[in-house]
């Protein structure tokens, strides 16, 4: 995202941010004004790998800067503790449907991306250490990232369309459409018109998690809220609702560390 900085105030698309210095490092903190906020609240977002300051609507930029400067050390420490990103490149270990795969670039091979089971190769020493499956990527090295993302999107679309179709049959009416996104704030959404959207990163999670998110958004086709009626329907569609919610709470944010494009 392009940031234009002047006098410590950075303008971004549809928002603003302030910059502060700590130990020779420049920190950019996004500002979020809320009419209902009564105090300043700082948080570091794992998925977006940034810092956000929520502030009362009537608070001044001077107050926001002073608050941020007082907590600059905390912001820097939290940002520095974020797990390292894992680009899609040769040798990386990435999950697909909850199972670790070693990315293997095969420039001379034909095709695009495919998975291989290497469990039978243990005795001959040709299997990668610690993993049972390889995700093979053909073509030039500069295309590996895009090809892996495209592969995950294709697999996610197939799994999600099948899951949505299965759950809507129980519900009795179909979704208007199924789309893919790469959002950091939500795993899925349902519009008032019945269009469902999901994060393609769900294909990296165990299948029961993807199935739950499909059931969750399908339940919104009938109840566009999180009322007790909604949760009753969601649990009827997916018996693993509580288990999937627990998995997402513990591990969901980590899915965003994979596939960060290298600059």
Image (cartoon, rainbow, N blue to C red):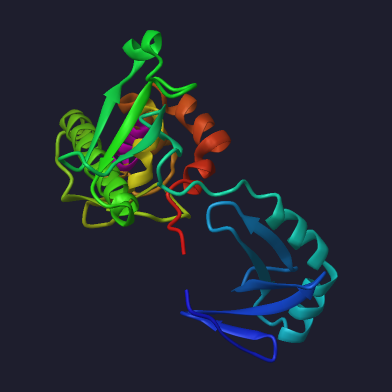
Residue placed most toward the observer, 141 or 29: 141
Which residue is found at the position 81% from the left and 74% from the top?
69
As drawn, the residue found furthest toward the right would be 70
Q: Is residue 65 left or right of residue 87?
A: right
The kind of secondary structure the magenta stretch mainly shows is helix
Q: Is residue 153 above or below residue 134?
A: below
Q: Which residues are magenta?
A: 210-219
Residue 73: percent from left, percent from top:
82, 63
Residue 162: percent from left, percent from top:
19, 33
Q: Is residue 123 left or right of residue 237?
A: right
Residue placed most toward the observer, 203 or 263: 263
As drawn, the residue found furthest toward the top would be 123
The answer to which image quadrant residue 20 occupies is bottom right
Residue placed most toward the observer, 168 or 131: 131
Q: Is residue 214 magenta?
A: yes
Which residue is found at the position 27% from the left and 52% from the top?
140
Which residue is found at the position 79% from the left and 67% from the top?
72
Q: Is residue 127 above or below residue 70?
A: above
As drawn, the residue found furthest toward the bottom would be 7
Q: Is residue 209 magenta?
A: no
The answer to which image quadrant residue 98 occupies is top left
Residue 18: percent from left, percent from top:
67, 79
Which residue is found at the position 33% from the left and 25% from the top?
236
Q: How many numbered badges does the structure rendering display?
A: 0
Residue 234: percent from left, percent from top:
36, 32
Residue 148, can we see it?
yes
Residue placed most toward the observer, 217 or 4: 4
Residue 222, can we see it?
no
């Amino acid at each position: 995202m392009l940031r234009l900085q002047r006098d410590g105030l950075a303008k971004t698309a549809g928002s603003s941010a302030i910059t502060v210095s700590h130990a020779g490092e420049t920190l950019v903190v996004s500002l979020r004004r809320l009419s209902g906020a009564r105090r300043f609240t700082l948080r570091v977002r794992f998925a977006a790998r940034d810092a956000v300051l929520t502030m009362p609507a009537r608070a001044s930029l001077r107050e926001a800067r002073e608050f941020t400067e007082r907590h600059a050390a905390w912001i820097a420490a939290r940002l520095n503790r974020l797990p390292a990103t894992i680009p899609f490149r040769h040798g990386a270990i990435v999950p697909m449907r909850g199972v670790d795969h070693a990315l293997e670039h095969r420039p001379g091979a034909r095709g695009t991306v495919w998975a291989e089971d290497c469990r039978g190769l243990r005795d001959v020493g040709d299997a990668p250490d610690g993993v049972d499956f390889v995700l093979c990527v053909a073509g030039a090295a500069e295309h590996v990232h895009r090809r892996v993302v495209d592969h995950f999107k294709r697999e996610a679309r197939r799994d999600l369309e099948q899951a949505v179709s299965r759950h809507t049959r129980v519900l009795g009416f179909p979704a208007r459409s199924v789309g893919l996104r790469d959002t950091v704030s939500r795993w899925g959404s349902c519009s008032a018109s019945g269009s469902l959207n999901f994060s393609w990163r769900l294909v990296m999670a165990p299948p029961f998690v993807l199935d739950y998110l499909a059931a969750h958004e399908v339940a919104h086709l009938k109840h566009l809220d999180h009322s007790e009626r909604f949760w009753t329907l969601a649990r009827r569609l997916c018996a693993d609702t509580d288990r999937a919610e627990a998995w997402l709470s513990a591990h969901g944010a980590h899915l965003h560390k994979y596939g960060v494009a290298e600059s």
